[in-house]
Amino acid sequence: MNIRKISRNLFGIIIFLAVSLYTINISGQAKSQEDTTEANLLQQVRNAFNQNNEQQFYEAIAQYRKYLLGEDNINGYYLSWKNEVLYDVNHNHFYRALRKTMKMQAEMERRGDHHELYKTTQLRGIIYSLRGNIPLAHQYFEKALDQVDHTQVNNLASIYMDLANIEMDTQPEEAMKHLDCAIEIIKGKSSSYDYSDAIGFKVIVAYAMRDWKAVNATFNEYIAMKGKKEEDFSPTYYYYALICKAVADRRYEEAIHLTYNLTNTTDIYKFQTEIYEISGDTERAFQTQKHYMAIKDSVNNVIMSEEMMGSASDLESAEAHNMTIAKRNTQLQYAISIVIFAFLLIGMVIYRMNHKRYMRKLQRQNHDLLIARDKAQEANRMKISFLRNMSHEIRTPLNIISGYAQIISDPRTLTSDSERADIAKRIAHSTNTIVRIVDEILDISSKESIHYIDKSDLVSCNDLLRQLAEPYDDDETSFSLRLELLLKDSCKIMTNRKEVKKILGHLMDNAIKFTPQDGTITLRSYQHKLDQNMICLSVTDTGCGIKDGDEEKIFEHFYKSDIYKEGVGLGLSVARRVARQLGGDVILDTRYKDGSRFILQLPKE
């Protein structure tokens, strides 16, 4: 198997994070000793960045950017904006980062700062490269090379390093050429820190080429620079270089041990997969690759959920703005008609003068309407793009089914019946995943369009809980199931049996997902303490619980408290919406701290 093809842009996050930290450190450095206000604002940005507090970081960098603009520090102003975009990229907020980049470009064009446009072009290349669109990223980086002032050594070199980064896995020889250009630019014209940073990256590119001789030579140069002057040495790629050197020396177990020094979990599994492949241990390479793909899929799920919510919000805002402009335009046209009629009574000359003036206003309004229409069309295009991305949620298990089907059909690839059984189990799991995703999406779509649900079924509350517990009443489950039926068996309510069973099914699935082995799930029926017309059906688990601040977020569309769990984040949202349509509600019992307790409240009539 060719494991190197499973990921492009291995060190993308590392490089852009390093750039972000470095530019934050140097911005305003020349004045920080003299200007206490700027130094304090910059320190607030650093503190928020290091504490990984998003809201605090956005507030701090907004204040810092406002201050720089007031001081007419245009370069620092755009640099701090670029840092905010890179912060979003480092936290997988790609849709948000792209929107800010477009806003940043519009600001540059409005102010006439065309010499700064290369920053937004380079940012787009970074965003598209990390989203996997390497050809488009390459186009933006090449465009940035044309836009940047070639006398700005650091900016020019960083673009060449970006090009080397995206070509490293697919065209390592081309990547080395771009990196050599960056090193030649930096050498003798920039700090030793920047030069050591580029040399450290060169060790990684040589590793990608599997040129072990070049790895050894470049590594020796890199370590020699570290020994000369520690403060002028960039440690960004230090552990990466050590790993590459260990592999070059065939010290594979040591290389595996060194990967645990990396802070990025994705990089750890990616390196381990390649090391096992190089050493010839295909079995461990295969197992590590599965962990690597699972982490990448989880991250992609978070990114696609954010893109869906962002594009939907943009479309709604554009449509609302479009309707407002249309209404204003209608009112303006009516006013113009009245004014024209009045001016006709006064005289043709006055009429013509005022008619031309109001027609100009109408043209401007029509122009605004066209702009709003274009924005709506763009938002619709982004929505369609999201729907295409959503196909990844289904395509991933389909690829698993296809791949394992080919393996299981060839008896030469398997040595035992247990392996065949395991693969068949995985195929069945992937099939169920596809069915569940489609069912959840169809379910939320239908519930959004329905405002009334028929409630003509006479339902026994205790029977519902018994039916819910029946499939799990065996020794094969990893958890204990308890029934606490405090209502009388004669207690019945008028509702919709099918929809109530779906709600309880979502709550039960959620409990099973987060309940550990030897845990307990409790199904309970009881009378509402404050409202005698309401009954309560609760599902309680002994899992990890809901963290503070997420009590209402968990009921939002596509929100997942744990991105590594299966599902698309629709179960609780659907459950609450249907419960409210039935006249009740689904709530989280925040007083229960030994796990999670969700309560379905329903009216008796």
Image (cartoon, helix red, strand yellow):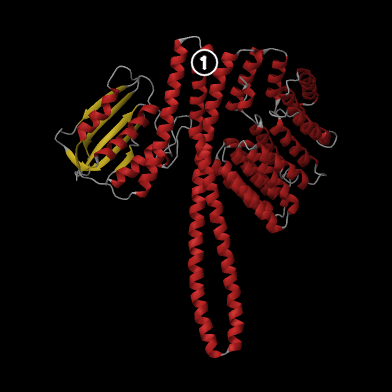
Residue 44, placed above or below residue 546: below
Residue 7 location, x and y as percent? 62, 28
Q: Is residue 546 visible?
A: no
Between 82 and 445, the one lying in front of the other is: 445
Q: Quadrant of the N terminus?
A: top right
**Which of the 4 quarters of the picture holds residue 11?**
top right
> Mark 1 — residue?
410
Between 238 and 402, the one lying in front of the other is: 402
Furthest-right residue in view? 188
Residue 101 location, x and y as percent? 63, 48
Q: Is residue 287 visible?
A: yes
Residue 143, placed above or below residue 471: below
Furthest-top residue in view? 415
The reply, left or right, for residue 467 in relation to residue 575 is left
The reply, left or right, for residue 91 in relation to residue 252 is left
- The residue that appears at 71% across and 46% down in the rendered structure is 119
Which kind of residue does numbered mark 1 sit on?
Asp
The 10 Å Cα crowd at callout 1, few under 14, some 14 to 19, many 20 or more, is few
Residue 502 location, x and y as percent? 31, 36
Label count reads: 1
- The residue that appears at 77% across and 18% down in the rendered structure is 216
Q: Dot 1 lies on which element? A: loop
Residue 175, placed above or below residue 373: above
Residue 214, placed above or below residue 298: above
Between 513 and 3, the one lying in front of the other is: 3
**Which of the 4 quarters of the picture holds residue 466?**
top left
The reply, left or right, for residue 472 in relation to residue 199 is left
**Which of the 4 quarters of the picture holds residue 574?**
top left
Residue 395 location, x and y as percent? 51, 32
Furthest-left residue in view? 490
